Image (spheres, rainbow, N blue to C red):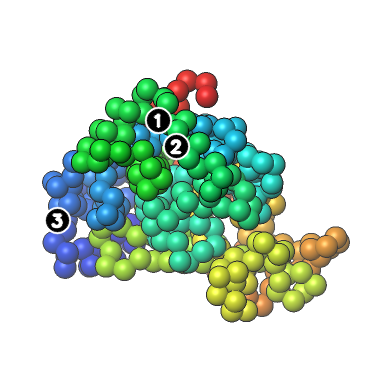
Amino acid sequence: MQVLKTQLSRLVIGIGLGLLIGCGGGAGSSGTTIQDPNRDNQTFKWDIPTKYPLPVVPATNPMTEEKFQLGRHLFYDQRLSGNGTQACASCHHQDKAFSDGLVRPLGSTGEMHPRHSQALVNTAYNASVNWGNPTTVILEQQPAIPLFGEFPVELGINDGNKEQVLQRLKNEPRYSALFSAAFPAQADSVNFDNIIKALASFVRGLSSFNSAFDSFENGNAFAISEEAKRGRDLFFDERTECFHCHDGFNFSLSSYDSSQQFADTAFFNNGLYSIGNTGAYPEGGEGIFEITGRPEDMGRFRPPTLRNIALTAPYMHDGSIATLEEVVRHYNAGGRNITSGPYAGDGRANPYKSSFVRPMGLSEAEIKALVAFLTTLTDQDFITNPRYANPWGSN
């Protein structure tokens, strides 16, 4: 299958990097595995199967359990916002694979974000972090955006309240031990540089590899239904092209791990809009065009992982498609034709659309089979794992 085709291609690189190759069995695969020698040098316990390579971690912020636990407390703490009303977890709920179920979220001061809240699933493997910014490539670049961003305001920390925010944290008895354990060489460790490192460490440690699909791949032939197996075959078929953008063990072509010499940054226009049949997308949701200004980058966004995708509705960068079945129908049509309103235009004919997005000609049974397969990527352990849960109780 295509996941393993990708694994095999990475082995070619991996051999040069000293990776060790083993073989096993499996219902849905040949059982090829990668044993990453980096694991022997890890002090952090990753919840990642040994057959997959570890994520790349910046040398300036090595993973430790102490930083992960500090980041977990900060992630769920509403005191880490300018007015003390929101936390990172306000827009990233564990039971929804750390998305929020909304079309677009409201920040702490009531401003609506132009993008749908991303799920936080295996983000350690993302080659770029945001929906549409090729310059944000490591998780340590991300927390400052919701913490300090002004367009829109999310957590609303600014020059006028940042000392107050830090004082709130210093007043919390639990943080004294958490910061000291995470940054033992620093006398005064409660600062935003360390807060960002800890938040990045927590998000990097959110790993999901225990779905029914994984069980099937590990040899349990009965882990997924016959309908889902038909959907799996369709997913990895050239007829649908799904795997071209959602490739590899993390189901995203935008990928970077310790077996790769270079990151696979990837962005695609999927025909969601073509306002006035010009190829344009709504202002504030124009993809990497907003960074590069190049016409060909209009509407190009990073393909997210599909792991836990059934939990993360609504879909697309702007939450404009309500259900997973509607997403499959969107791709089956080769894009979306909006016939009225301010965004009217035929996205199916968008001049910047990826060549992978074209009419599939799926039957109703095949559409349902694809949805059934995508649902097998749900990992119940991930959304109930107490290690990832709110340490404050009801915050």
Instruction: Look at mark 2 in the image and give the residue it sits on.
Output: 166
Q: Position of residue 236 (x, y in %)?
A: 46, 58
Quarter location, residue 254: bottom left
Quarter location, residue 271: bottom right
Q: Position of residue 40 (x, y in %)?
A: 13, 46
Q: Position of residue 99 (x, y in %)?
A: 55, 41
Q: Residues within 10 Å of mark 1 (few under 14, many from 20)?
A: some
Residue drawn at the location 52% of the way across and 24% of the way down: 395
State if disc 3 and disc 1 touch (CB < 8 Å): no
Q: Of the residues shown, which amino acid type is indicated by label 1?
A: Lys
- CA distance for labels 2 and 3: 46 Å
Question: Which structural element holds mark 1?
Answer: helix
Instruction: Look at mark 3 in the image and give the residue it sits on.
Output: 20
Question: Which structural element holds mark 3?
Answer: strand
Q: Name above or below for residue 293 compared with residue 272.
A: below
Q: Is residue 186 left or right of residue 340?
A: left
